[in-house]
């Protein structure tokens, strides 16, 4: 079955439905929240990046435009914080779907202002009970939060991105909210345990999701959900290569048509301990001082060399980092 999908006057090319159709590199955008903070947008906890939607939507558009100018080929809707934890239950009930629609519209306007056909818009579906907290996941309550996000975003997005998923249960809930009859690409991105990133980088510890599940389970889930891409995000850059290697090995025996693309967008947070993970939603995390665009590019070169074909950045990775990737990495179209 073909998956050409018309959105207004724009038709997504069939080749984009399977990121592995050609061996090209796709450049994602970087983090939204920290960039909003950097440019002076309304920004605080608990609202996080949702506060700009409520009080200064033009700042969100400014961030999208900055990433497109830097070379991003996929930008992500600012819908990550449109959940009850960040904006409150009553505001979510009254405004959640409308805020998601606003996030979608701002992203679509930025895409429309770019060179036709060059940029796609990914609809961000977040972990609905808090970042890095798969232990709080409640399957029976997930649809109540995800469904308004999907309804609000759906008229605007080219693909779905369930991101920062801490467990396979979270990913399944996001896929169920989108529905199997939606033919747009579904990408799933898991966040990895980075309590001891050096141990993972050195091979002394296997990479795993924050739930404790192994990368092999993430691979199986991506295939089960018919995901066109499996990504790893919002974790320390040092843990990513091991996860990419495992995913690449797992996909090696699949035909090109059946093999999901592999992607990475790391954060720039200082390493967390387990207690920090539990408090990740309550404050503004400290950023590393040793991860500049050049060093991030060095990581990205390694990720690409072991199988990643979708590369971008997460929290604390701004437009200057994305420009470094877009300028320096090969096979970028």
Image (tube, grey):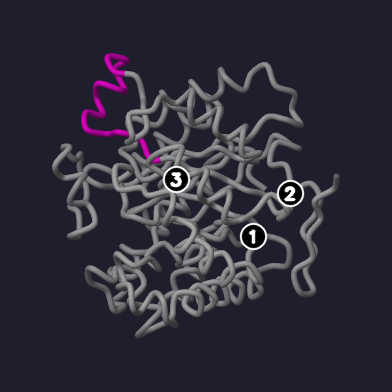
**Left or right for 236, reference 323:** left
Instruction: Name the disc covering residue 16, or none.
Output: 2
Verify CB contact (< 8 Å) between mark 1 and mark 2.
Answer: yes
Q: Which residue is mark 3?
A: 170
- Label 2: element kind: helix
Q: Magenta stretch?
A: 191-205
Which residue, as the protein is rendered here, is positioned at the far bottom? 55
Specify the quadrant of the image occupied by residue 281.
Answer: bottom left
Q: Calculate the distance from the C-alpha at mark 3 to the C-alpha at mark 1.
A: 24 Å
- Pick whichever of labels 3 and 2 is earlier in the sequence: 2
- Label 3: element kind: helix
Which residue occupies 30% across, 48% down? 136
- Label 1: element kind: strand
Which residue, as the protein is rendered here, is positioned at the far right? 1
Q: Is residue 172 above or below residue 298?
A: below
Within-10-Å neighbours for mark 2: few <14, some 14–19, many 20+:
some
Q: x and y percent of residue 304 in the render?
A: 53, 32
Q: Which residue is mark 1?
A: 120
* Residue 309, magenta (yes or no): no
Within-10-Å neighbours for mark 1: few <14, some 14–19, many 20+:
many
Q: Calculate the distance from the C-alpha at mark 3 to the C-alpha at mark 2.
A: 25 Å
Looking at the picture, tell me which residue is in the foreground, 153 or 325: 153
Q: x and y percent of residue 50 in the render?
A: 36, 72
């Amino acid at each position: 079955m073909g998956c050409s999908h018309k959105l207004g006057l724009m038709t997504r090319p069939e080749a984009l439905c399977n990121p592995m159709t050609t061996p090209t590199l796709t450049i994602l955008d970087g983090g939204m929240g920290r960039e909003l903070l950097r440019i002076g947008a309304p920004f605080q906890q608990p609202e996080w990046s949702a506060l700009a939607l409520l009080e200064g939507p033009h700042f969100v558009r400014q961030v999208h435009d900055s990433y497109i100018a830097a070379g991003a080929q996929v930008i992500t809707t600012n819908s990550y914080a449109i959940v009850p934890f960040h904006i409150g239950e009553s505001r979510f009930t009254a405004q959640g779907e409308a805020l998601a629609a606003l996030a979608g519209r701002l992203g679509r306007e930025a895409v429309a202002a770019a060179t036709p056909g060059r940029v796609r818009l990914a609809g961000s579906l977040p972990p609905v009970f808090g970042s890095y907290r798969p232990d709080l996941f409640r399957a029976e309550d997930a649809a109540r939060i995800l469904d308004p996000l999907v309804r609000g975003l759906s008229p605007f997005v080219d693909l779905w991105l369930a991101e920062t998923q801490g467990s396979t249960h979270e990913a399944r809930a996001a896929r169920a909210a989108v529905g199997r009859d939606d033919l747009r690409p579904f990408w799933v991105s898991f966040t990895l345990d980075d309590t001891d990133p050096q141990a993972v980088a050195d091979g002394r510890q296997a990479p795993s999701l924050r739930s404790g599940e192994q990368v092999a389970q993430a691979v199986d889930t991506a295939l089960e959900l018919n995901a066109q891409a499996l990504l790893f995000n919002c974790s320390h850059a040092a843990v990513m290569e091991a996860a990419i290697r495992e995913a690449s090995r797992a996909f090696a025996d699949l035909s090109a048509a059946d093999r999901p693309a592999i992607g990475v967008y790391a954060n720039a947070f200082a390493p967390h301990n387990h207690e920090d993970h539990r408090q990740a939603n309550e404050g503004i995390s400290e950023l590393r001082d040793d991860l500049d665009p050049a060093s991030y590019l060095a990581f990205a070169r390694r990720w690409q060399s072991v199988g990643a074909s979708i590369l971008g950045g997460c929290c604390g990775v701004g437009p200057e980092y994305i420009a470094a990737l877009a300028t320096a990495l090969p096979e970028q179209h």
